[in-house]
């Protein structure tokens, strides 16, 4: 039984020394939305806002040990996973998740930093799809990540993004939220694809401002709303509004 009965979101992610993304963004988002975090660090990185200079992946057994300890210590109502990086970390994380099927998982498939530096070993991408994604409630790829995960070219329009998202959703048997931040146009539209359900579109005005870590913020905000008992659709809508407000706020 958890020693701390207050609702928590468990964050499984890497560090970003710049503070722009990764676990720093996740914990800050969860706190801003009123819940507590517990954490399992997967990697330590030396990053600026422009480049990834160094990555040290933690031993997979240590990642799993952190997850088990966090779950034992707290009442975890949702799990957000970000950077995992290696086959071993993915396998160990999946083993822990299989023992807790009652806890919904939001997976942000972090493949590269905003600066372009790879954050996952190339041979781990298939493991992410086959071992981890089927255990999740939602997967949140951006357009470049979706292209890698489906073996496709980057979608050039909403129809092709929707098709790739439906393909991924079918293949991993879970919901997929295709993020439209990398697309063009006056709207930033995210597409929620779920097996055997019609697509749902969540749109907001595209703001003339860039901010690192928006994917971390979005996925963590979704995890918070799910932890609070909201439906998946409600959680996506609330999280998208949270990101919009962050982008629209003072610089």
Image: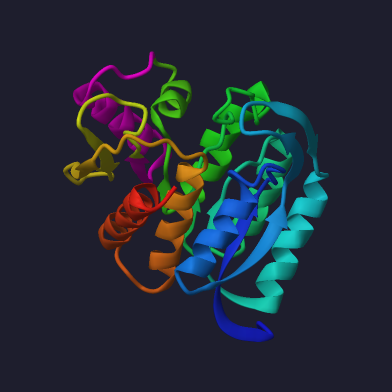
Horizontally, residue 238 falls left or right of residue 140, namely: left
Query: Which quadrant of the view contains residue 16?
Result: top right
Q: Give the colour scheme shown.
A: rainbow
Residue 91 seen in render: yes
Rendered view: 121 above or below 232? above
Q: Residue furthest top?
A: 153
Residue at 38% over, 13% down: 153
Residue at figure coordinates x 42%, y 23% from the top left: 150
Residue placed most toward the observer, 203 or 145: 203
Looking at the rendered image, the quarter that the N terminus falls into is bottom right
In the image, residue 8 above or below residue 89: below
| Res. 102 in view | no
Q: Main secondary structure of the magenta part?
A: helix
- The stretch of residues the image draws in magenta is 153-177
**Which residue lies at the image location 78% right of the left edge and 38% below the top edge?**
57
Percent coordinates x, y for residue 68 in the rendering: 72, 65
Is residue 164 rendered magenta in the image?
yes
Q: In terms of depth relative to the viewer, which is nearer, 37 or 115?
A: 115
> How many numbered marks appear?
0
- Give residue 78's position: percent from left, percent from top: 50, 65
Q: Is residue 242 above or below residue 36?
A: above
Q: Position of residue 39 (x, y in %)?
A: 68, 61
Quarter residue 163 falls in: top left
Residue 74 as seen in the image, left or right of residue 229: right
Residue farthest to the front, as pictured: 250
- Expressed as whole percent of the image width and height from the top left, the position of residue 233 reads 26, 57
Give the residue at x 27% y 24%: 184
In the depicted structure, whether residue 33 falls above or below residue 129 = below
Q: Is residue 109 magenta?
A: no
């Amino acid at each position: 039984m958890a020693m701390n009965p207050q609702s928590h979101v468990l964050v499984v992610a890497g560090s970003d020394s710049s503070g722009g993304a990764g676990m720093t963004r996740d914990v800050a988002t969860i706190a801003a939305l009123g819940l507590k975090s517990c954490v399992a660090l997967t990697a330590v990185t030396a990053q600026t806002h422009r480049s990834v200079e160094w990555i040290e992946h933690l031993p997979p057994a240590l990642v799993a040990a952190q997850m088990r300890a966090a779950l034992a210590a707290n009442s975890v109502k949702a799990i957000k996973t970000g950077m995992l990086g290696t086959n071993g970390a993915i396998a160990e994380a999946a083993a822990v998740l299989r023992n807790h099927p009652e806890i919904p998982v939001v997976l942000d498939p972090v493949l590269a930093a905003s600066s372009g530096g790879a954050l996952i070993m190339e041979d781990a991408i298939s493991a992410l799809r086959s071992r981890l994604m089927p255990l999740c409630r939602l997967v949140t790829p951006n357009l470049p990540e979706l292209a890698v995960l489906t073996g496709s070219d980057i979608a050039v329009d909403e129809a092709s993004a929707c098709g790739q998202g439906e393909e991924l959703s079918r293949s991993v048997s879970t919901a997929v939220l295709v993020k439209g931040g990398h697309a063009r146009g006056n709207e930033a539209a995210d597409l929620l694809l779920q097996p055997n359900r019609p697509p749902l579109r969540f749109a907001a005005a595209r703001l003339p401002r860039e901010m690192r870590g928006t994917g971390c913020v979005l996925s963590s905000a979704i995890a918070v709303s799910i932890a609070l008992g909201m439906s998946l659709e409600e959680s996506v809508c609330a999280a998208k509004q949270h990101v919009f407000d962050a982008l629209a706020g003072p610089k």
